[in-house]
Amino acid sequence: MSSRIVVKNLPKHITEERFRGHFSGKGEVTDAKLMYTERGQFRRFGFVGYRSEDEALAAQQYFNNSFIDTSKVSVEIAKPFGDASLPRAWSVYTKGTTLYNQVHGVQQEKKKPVEEKKGQKAIRTLYEELLADNQDDPRFKEFLQVMAPRANNKTWTNDDYSEWHTTEQAAVNSAVAARREQLESKVTPAKSSKSASKKTAASAVDAEPTEGQDSGSGLSDMEWLRKHMSTKVDLDDVDGDDDADMNDEQPTPTVDEDTAGQDGSEAAGNTTDLAVAVASIVSQIQDTGRLFIRNLPYLATEEDLRAAFEKFGPLSEVHMPISKDTKRPKGFAYVLYLLPEHAVSAYRAMDNKVFLGRLLHVLPGKEKPQEREAGDSLAGFKSDVKKERDAKKKALAG
């Protein structure tokens, strides 16, 4: 069980100080966080972290279905990051959901087709070899034609049409030609007269030039060509304007260009980038065996860290820096393992996990710097300027 609780349906005007003070009555609060969108809009829920799981359970039972002002809040035990029992995300603010992709214009990657099994590959290879060996056999071709699916053949043709003799094909062709002539001879006189009148009217229209139309007499070949070229360009311009007007009438969703570009790149390479980042972190931890742990509560002590990280292997050192001004921990620490393999196991198990009511962030730590000797400002090495100055002092001293 986790030592954090999630509080839903909070009032819109609540502040973080009031939020922390309201839930501090049932235990020592180590973290209180209200959730906002990227544009600063309050999402009306938040997280509260307690020092122990018992305090979190007591707060959940006490504050659940209670009221803050006029809002009835729902309090639940927060589940760890990446828990298998978490429901599927659906919010428009959560990256990777369908609503988020639609609003930000993120294109989802198409799933790769499942690779064929070994048995299917063997059958396909055998089929191709059989076709190559019998491609000239007429009986094999006939067998393939008979066994072909009905969907690949035309339903209005006979199966043995390709095997007809030339005499039978000639008889069919003559019958089709006779039927066509019979249909053409049954054209009504009224229809023929109408078509004739249309042809005469069309010829008359073609013969008479329309108003503003030049017959072409008196124009040189170059002038005639230029005239027709300009007419073609004008028509293209008119068509382009019509298309632009149609496109303007269609509404397009407004999307923030900066966020859309960033989200698209993250969605396109999310899985690959995550695997590469994890592999790089693991390699760095294997080199040093040192972990950098941040987002620690100020009340955490070295004993608490040792108790949480010693279960993965023997520790060589636990260092928690103290602020000179406040004399309190700075909120981060370094943990050094005797064996780098134990450090890798601790990173995989403790990253994004709840510790004293807060989510830990575990990163690879750099190697511990070597201690300098007393009076040696450059770890045993002097610059050329200092060497020259010391040489001058010795020369003047005689």
Image: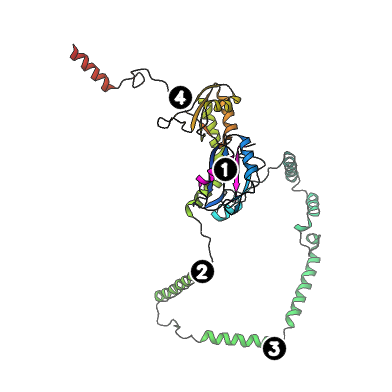
Q: Which mark is residue 23?
A: 1
Q: Estimate the spatial distance between the alpha carbons at disc 2 and disc 4, rounded to whole Å.
A: 67 Å
First of labels 2, 4 by sequence position = 2
Estimate how packed mark 4 is, as few (under 14), some (14 to 19) or many (20 or more) residues with alpha carbons within 10 Å. few
Whether residue 9 sits left or right of residue 326 in the image: it is right
Residue underneath mark 4 = 368
Amino acid carrying label 2: it is Asp
Q: Is residue 178 above or below residue 251?
A: below
x and y percent of residue 132 in the render? Answer: 72, 45
Q: Nearer the viewer, residue 132 or 376?
A: 376
| Quarter containing the C terminus | top left
Between 172 and 369, the residue placed more toward the observer is 369
Q: Which residue is mark 3?
A: 190
Which mark's residue is nearer the viewer, 3 or 1? 1
Circle 2 sits on which residue? 243
The reply to whether callout 1 and callout 2 are in contact (CB within 8 Å) is no
Bin the neighbour count of mark 1 within 10 Å (Cα to Cα): few under 14, some 14-19, many 20 and up: many
From the top left corner, tell me how far across and down residue 192 is, in percent.
68, 86
Q: 234 or 14: nearer the eye? A: 14
